[in-house]
């Protein structure tokens, strides 16, 4: 990847993270941890890898994004606003009564949302059904399924993975956000996931490892996944809960914090750095 393209992706990540943090700080609470850990992925998808039309969200030839870890909605909403699916001012209606931006994504409310998610585990089945339909239609479209590592506690994930693997549905690119924490604590303390990559391989997936903090690594992994033709494929993406917001790295409330004065100061510092980076590289 050349320097110009990498800079575009990094600037894209900065824009998404900035808008998500503005939105969450305005609301005074929200799902920060899991939203931040998918920011670099969302930049790579919407700036490079995904087929979509922001002016026509229901474009029949689009690729699909299924954010099965629906609590990461703020990361998706910020991405959609940055890429012109709706006005950025709408971000400040997050979780309000009658909002088009509910806590978890709803495809009937938000332009650009392809699947209603948030009941963890169910997104895998939705993606499996979409992928199987694309297979029957002999379509070249892809389904990008984003699954949380804590979500893998749900048995429905593994049932759907079996279906995807049995049918060799490479139309579905499974991306596991391996940030190593869930709502109640560290994965290994709640239910030890053991080796996720080996588990996916045992289920019949070709697996690829990516550094989820590095846009080039993510993009290379997606390129490799797209080239797989003879099996199901999965990217295990190493990330950090609350990625890009160091104040929350070691805190137990990173999943869905409420913000006080100390947190405000930490968020303000991060947002100032993001704004400076964006300004130095051509602005918004």
Image (cartoon, rainbow, N blue to C red):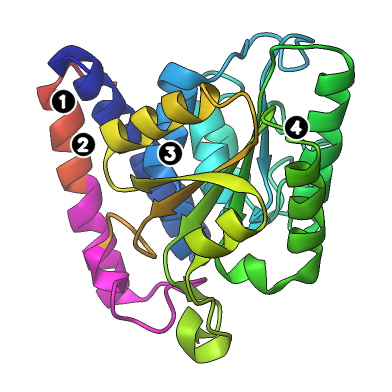
Look at mark 3 in the image and give the residue it sits on: 41
Look at mark 1 in the image and give the residue it sits on: 279
User: Which image quarter is the C terminus in?
Assistant: top left
Number of marks: 4
Mark 2–mark 1 CB contact (< 8 Å): yes
Of tags 4 and 2, the one toward the viewer is: 4
Q: Is residue 142 left or right of residue 177?
A: right
| First-in-chain label (3 vs 2) | 3
The correct choice, above or below, for 103 with respect to 262 in the image is: above
Do we see residue 30 in this rendering?
Answer: no
Q: Residue furthest left?
A: 280
Mark 4–mark 3 CB contact (< 8 Å): no
Q: Is residue 256 magenta?
A: yes
What distance separates the C-alpha of mark 1 from that of mark 3?
22 Å
In the image, 166 versus 13, the foreground residue is 166
What distance separates the C-alpha of mark 2 from that of mark 1?
6 Å
Rendering coords of residue 192 (x, y %): 53, 83
| First-in-chain label (1 vs 3) | 3
| Span colored in magenta | 246-271
What distance separates the C-alpha of mark 3 from that of mark 2?
20 Å
Look at mark 4 in the image and give the residue it sits on: 114
SS of the residue at dot 1?
helix
SS of the residue at dot 2?
helix
What distance separates the C-alpha of mark 1 from that of mark 4?
32 Å
| First-in-chain label (4 vs 3) | 3
The correct choice, above or below, for 58 with respect to 180 in the image is: above
Q: Is residue 79 magenta?
A: no
């Amino acid at each position: 990847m050349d320097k110009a393209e990498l800079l575009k992706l990094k600037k894209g990540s900065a824009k998404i993270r900035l808008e998500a943090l503005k939105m969450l700080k305005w609301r005074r609470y929200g799902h920060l941890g899991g939203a931040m850990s998918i920011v670099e992925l969302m930049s790579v998808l919407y700036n490079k890898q995904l087929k979509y039309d922001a002016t026509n969200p229901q474009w029949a030839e689009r690729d699909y994004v299924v954010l099965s870890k629906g609590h990461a909605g703020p990361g998706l909403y910020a991405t959609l606003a940055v890429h012109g699916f709706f006005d950025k001012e709408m971000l400040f209606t997050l979780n309000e009564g009658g909002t088009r931006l509910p806590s978890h994504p709803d495809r009937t409310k938000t332009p650009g949302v392809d699947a209603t998610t948030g009941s963890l585990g169910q997104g895998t089945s939705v993606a499996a059904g979409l992928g199987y339909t694309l297979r029957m239609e002999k379509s070249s479209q892809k389904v990008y399924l984003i699954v949380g590592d804590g979500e893998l506690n749900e048995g429905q994930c593994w049932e759907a993975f079996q279906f995807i693997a049995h049918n060799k549905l490479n139309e579905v690119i499974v991306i596991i956000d391996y940030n190593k924490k869930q709502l109640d604590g560290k994965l290994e303390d709640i239910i030890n996931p053991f080796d996720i990559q080996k588990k996916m391989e045992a289920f019949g997936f070709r697996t690829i490892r990516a550094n989820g903090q590095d846009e080039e690594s993510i993009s290379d992994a997606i390129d490799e996944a797209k080239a797989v033709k003879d099996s199901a494929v999965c990217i295990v993406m190493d990330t950090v809960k609350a990625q890009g917001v160091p104040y929350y790295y070691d805190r137990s409330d990173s999943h869905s914090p409420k913000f006080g004065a100390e947190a405000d100061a930490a968020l303000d510092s991060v947002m100032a750095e993001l704004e400076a980076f964006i300004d130095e590289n051509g602005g918004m």
